[in-house]
Structure formats: C-alpha cells, structure tokens
Amino acid sequence: MIAIINTLINGLLLGGIYAVTAVGLSLQYGVARILNIGHGEYIMVGAFITWMLHTTTGINPLLCLVVVGPVLFVIGYLVQRFLFKTLKDRSPSPAAFEGSSMLLAFGTLFIIQSLAIFIWGRNVEGYSYMAYSVYLGPLRFSANRLVILIFAILICILFYLFLAHTRIGKAIRASSQDPEAASLMGVKINRMLAICFALGAMMAGFAGMLISLAYPINTTMGMQYTIIAIIVVVLGGLGSILGSLIGGFLLGIFGAIVSNFEPGLTLAAYYLLFMVLLLVKPSGIFGR
Amino acid sequence: MKAENVSKRYLTPVILILLLALLIALPWFTRPYMVVLLKTILMFTILSLSWALFSGTTGYTSLATAAFYGVGLYTAAKLGNVLPVPLMVLCGGLFSFILAAAIGAITLRLKGIYFAIFTLSTVELIKNVMHWYEINVAGVRGHRILHVSDATVFYYLLGITVLLLLVTYLIKRSKYGLALSSIGSCEEAAAHIGVNVITLKVFTFALSSFFVGLAGAIMATSINYIDAYIAFDLNYSFFPTLMAIFGGMGNLFGPVIGAVVFSYLREILITRFPYAYMFIFGLVMVLTILYLPNGLVGLYQTIRLKLKQANNKKEKTLGGKHASTSS
C-alpha cells in the first residue's frame, strides 16, 4: 500500500514539471498553429539563466522567475514576430504553414542551442537547493521536488486564470476558436499570435527554472523535454490547455509506475505510449 | 537547330558519365583525406536523395532516417564478422526495408505533423530500447566493427548513389512517379482517380529506406565503435531533411547539391568550430524555409525564368532581329 502511494506521489512530483512543460507548447500549437520542436531549448535557456543567477549572485532560484519570465517572453515574441510571422505571410495555405513551421522551429532549435553552448559550454551543471528530505508519516520525499510541484500547480492555475478571466486571455481564446471571427470583433490577430508564442516561451522558461531546482542541466537537454512536452500535449489533446495539465500528471504517474519496475525503460515506455496513442486516438484523451 | 537539340539532349548524360569516371579514378591519385571527405559527402547524398524520394514527392515529412541508418550500422555490427561484406550490406538494406514497411503500414492514418512526430519518436524508441537491451540483457554496450579500407567503402557508396539516382530518375519518369506526386498534391483526389495510395506510400517509403540501410551498413565499417546513442543519432534525420530542402526537390540533383554543400561545410567547420557549424546550419535552415521554399534549384529556375522574360522583352523591342542569335 505504502509502495503504491509512494509511486503515486512520485508521479505527481514528476507530473508537475511535465504539465508546466506542456502548457506552453499546447498554447503555441493551439492558437498559433506552430508545433514548436524547439520548445525544449527555451526550457534549457530558462534553466541556465536560473543557474547562472543563483550561482553568481546567490539569490533564491525561485525568485529568478522575475527575470526568466520577461526574458523568455521577449525572445519568444521576437522569434514569432520575425520568423513565424514572415513564414505565415509567405505560406500558400494553413496546412503548408503547419508543416514548414515545424521545420522552421528546427532551425531555431539549432540556433538557440549553438548560442547556448557558446555561452554556457557543454558541461552538466547544477546546484543544490533544499536538498533534504521531508517526512510525512512513513512517506519520504525530497523537499525541492515538493517545492517544484507546489510552484508548478501555482503557475498553471495562475496561467489558467489569466486565460479565463483577463481581456488578453479572452482574446487569445477567441483567436484559437475562430481567428476570422475574432479579427472581425476587433482582436488584433497578429499581435495575439505573437503574444501566444511569447507566453509559451515564458512557460517554457518557468519549466526550466523548476527543472534546474532538482535536476542536473546541460545545454543539450532540450530535445528530451520537447518530446515529453509533445507527448503530454498529444495525450491531453493538441491545443487543449486543461488537457495538457491533466496529461502532464497522468504521464508523471505512468512514468513513476514504469520506473518502479524498470527505471531504464521509462523513456522508451513514454515513446511507446505516445505512438500507440497517435495510432489509436490522435486527438488525445481529452480532444474534441 | 536539330544538331543543337541533339547536343543538348546528350550533354547532361555525358557530363554525368565523365564525372562518374573522375570519381572512380579519384582514389588512385588523391590524398587519402579526400577519399574520407568524399565518403561523408556520398553518405549524406544518399540520405538526402532517399529522403527526397519519399518525403519530397509525397509531402510526408519523415524524420525516421536515423532509424534506418542506425539499423544499417547495427546490421554491420552484428553480422560484419559472419557474412562477407556485400551480403552484409545487402542485409542492412533489407532490414531497413522491413522496418520501413512496418512503420509505413501502421502509420497509414497519420498525416502532416502527426506523421513527422511519430517517425521522430520511432527513432527515440528504438534508441532507448536498444540501449536498455545492451546494458541489461546482452550485458555489453557497443560493438567493434570489422574494418574495411576507405577506398572500398567509397566505391560501395558511389555504387549505391548511382543506383539511387537511377531509381529516382526512373520513378520520376514513370506513371508510378506521377501517382506519387499526385499523392503530394492531393491525396484524396489521387485515391479517387484510382491510385493505390496505401501500397504506393508504403512501398516507396520502404524502398527509399532500403538505400539508407545500405549506406549505414557500409559506413559502419569505417567507424571503430558504435552503440545505440551513436547509431540512432537524431542528427541523421535532421541533416538530410535540411540538405534536401536547401538543395531543392524540384530537380533530381537538388538534394545532391544540398548534401555536397552541407557535408563539405560540416567537414571544414565541425573539427574546429562545432558550434559555428550548428549555428550556420540553423541559420541556413531558417533562411531557406523562409525565403527559398524551393531550394537552390528553385532559385536557379526563378532566375532563369526572369532572364528569359527579360530577353524576350529585349527581343520584342529590337523587333525580333536577333532572336536566333541572342541565345
């Protein structure tokens, strides 16, 4: 019994990160129609900015949120404004845009990664933060991962409230449901698309910050998190924010169960689950 | 006029045969380094051509090239000491063919980006399972491979390239090629006019992967050591994709040009400035997709069309006096 609860809690702890990782990607795909293969690179940049700030100035890594968020928002905004916007204007059809935007995202992946390697090198980095255990009855888990989970849930709830209740949030949702009608209603579509992509990058940055709290980071880690994010997003239905939140926790629990039996096969199990899901129900568990 | 047409018609084949003869003779009189460089170039040429053969014509972006290349490498690792080299290479191709046919058969329903991410995760799945298998079940990680001389590998690769070029050429000229590009334009319409879409897609996917497997199996003999992470490196999926797009797929030689340019760039940059290479790679990819959607070949065709139009205008103003001599 305790083993089962332990696995579940481990899954939730892992799932928090997965959820934050995926929410940004889901927003980018759902509204801007960009399957951002370079998503993991924004995560990596967020993680390294946090690491750099913490190790040089010693400020609390959680406070780096204030720096990581705006920096990645600006990067994302510029990338959408100068690259994806140009591509969208030149694409003959939305379907063509979807295909080539993925390839364009590959290009940005290589650029961001090479710049990051140039700045931060190739070594595995990390720092220790709240690296002690917390006991809850017979259960034991590390404090930093608990903090990650709490922050992940907080970030996701705030993000959800932002989308549901603010003016910009409503405009974003309108653009995702019907871009033409939204633009007729006075929503500045191009600005919304750029803001969406920027928000996605910002969420990726937050995910990176959270990851750096408990896990070793390096400049080539992006791809791994991109694929996890894609899996979660497909699991929850492409473009559904709430779906990817739940999908994140589901994948976390699935991962914890698999690694209970065979830790070496966790990633392989993710891919297998993902491929089966694509074949059986590509619209995702919560897809429309 | 007729003589001009005849000479134009035979010009390309003659140049190609001369080029081939030059390549065949090359190992006899150049530095060994040149052969090593050409090996890489030919390898990427094969990968890009095979990518263009399926993905270029049908519009299905496959990112599974690394899986087929890795299968070739592993075939060499497992069978290299048992079978003679030609048979081993053939096995590499066949295993890739079978794997591609299986992937093709189960992904029939997937379109667009779904197909792309499915093929991408296929590579990762095979890599992870292989890695786990080697550590936990087989107990050995990595393999040493029988070494074959550079010149021999070079000739194998040259042979595969020529064969692949011929196959692509013949397919493009046949009704089979027309059917393939009709899938690329509109799959439903293709199915309605009687194209056997499913068989055609799966078979072409498998056929194009066959050549990747061949290339992998022979390239393995010049690598000393492989393991799952080396063999199933996703870059073998990304590079050929960009090379083919950069070169342009409107022409048989587009992917070849892309592969030659990029493998050469890679050779000179990767040893001294590996990050610069990645940066340039990404930058060119972005610029190509934004401004050269039809690649270098497309650019060339556009320029030629514009020149022709300009010429025509000139001729019109001159009253067509120099129409026959101006070209």
Image (cartoon, coloured by chain):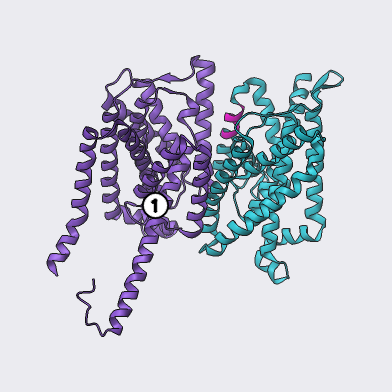
Chain colours: A cyan, B purple
Q: Amino acid at mark 1?
A: Gly
Q: Secondary structure at mark 1?
A: helix
Chain of the residue where label 1 is placed in the rendered structure: B
Using the rendered image of the protein, determine whether residue B78 is visible from the camera's viewpoint.
yes
Picture quarter with the C terminus of chain B: bottom left
Quarter-wise, where is residue A112 in the image? top right
Q: Is residue A267 magenta?
A: yes
Q: Most prominent secondary structure in the magenta stretch?
A: helix
Residue with the most extreme right position: A137
Q: Nearer the viewer, residue A140 or B225?
A: B225
Residue with the most extreme left position: B3
Q: Residue at x 71, y 31 (%)?
A: A253
Q: Residue at x 33, y 18 (%)?
A: B81
Q: Magenta residues, as a range? A: A266-271
Picture quarter with the N terminus of chain B: bottom left
> How far from the left and from the top, in percent, is residue A196?
69, 55
Q: Residue at x 43, y 59 (%)?
A: B186
- Please state if B277 lies on the left or on the right of B301 as rendered: right
Quarter-wise, where is residue A39 in the image? top right
Using the rendered image of the protein, determine whether residue B63 is visible from the camera's viewpoint.
no
Q: Is residue A217 magenta?
A: no
> How far from the left and from the top, in percent, is residue B57?
39, 53
Residue indicated by mark 1 = B247
> How far from the left and from the top, in percent, is residue B170?
26, 50
